[in-house]
Image: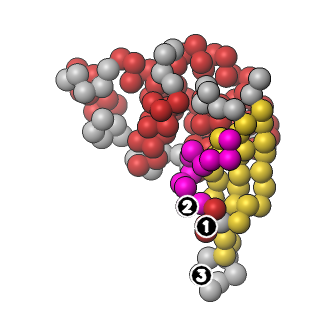
């Protein structure tokens, strides 16, 4: 999946066989979920965005079809490499899209930036206490500030 930052590149990827229709469907669902997360936190709260995305989960699962967690995570990584979204929108989207996730924890951590008094923040998603979105080294730099747990039934 080379350069998907432009719609023409996506169309070429499909036409040239580098991007299958299933990949395009996963990309569309992941982008739409990340945009929903962005709208949710822009016009509401993080808990509110989590609730709205959780309500969409049955529809998202149907739209994803047979695509499962590894494809969703690879797509989220590809989107991140192109500078789309934020760590928080990715973590929110992943929480809503990961089908086999057991116990998830959305974490926001903070760290002091160098010698200044400025704080940096970062969000990540843990599934069964393992970081799946946001970087495995997040806990070494950032101290958890807020966390939201959820159990899938």
Task: For residue 79, say whether it is visible.
Answer: no
The mark found on residue 51 in the picture is none
The image position of residue 150, as x and y in percent, is: 78, 36
Q: Which residue is mark 1?
A: 140
Mark 3 and mark 2: Cα distance apart in space: 17 Å
The image position of residue 2, as x and y in percent, is: 27, 39
The image position of residue 93, as x and y in percent, is: 61, 36
Mark 3 or mark 1, whichever is nearer to me: 1
Quarter location, residue 47 = top right
SS state under label 2: loop
The mark found on residue 137 in the picture is 2
| Extent of the magenta region | 128-138
Q: Are marks 2 and 1 in contact (CB under 8 Å)?
A: yes
Q: Does the magenta segment cover residue 129?
A: yes
Which quarter of the image is occupied by the C terminus?
A: top right
Task: For residue 73, say whether it is visible.
Answer: yes
Mark 3 and mark 1: Cα distance apart in space: 15 Å
Q: Residue at x 77, y 61 (%)?
A: 145
């Amino acid at each position: 999946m080379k350069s998907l930052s432009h719609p023409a590149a996506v169309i070429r990827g499909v036409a040239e066989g580098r991007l299958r229709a299933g990949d395009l469907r996963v990309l569309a669902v992941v982008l739409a979920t990340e945009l929903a997360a962005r709208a949710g936190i822009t016009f509401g709260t993080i808990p509110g965005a989590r609730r709205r995305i959780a309500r969409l989960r049955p529809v998202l699962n149907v739209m994803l079809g047979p695509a499962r967690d590894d494809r969703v995570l690879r797509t989220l990584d590809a989107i991140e490499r192109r500078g789309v979204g934020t760590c928080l929108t990715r973590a929110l989207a992943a929480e809503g899209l990961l089908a086999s996730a057991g116990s998830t924890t959305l974490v926001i951590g903070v760290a002091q930036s160098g010698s200044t008094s400025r704080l940096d923040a970062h969000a990540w998603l843990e599934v069964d206490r393992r970081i799946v979105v946001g970087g495995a080294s997040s806990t070494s730099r950032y101290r958890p500030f807020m966390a939201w747990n959820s159990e899938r039934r």
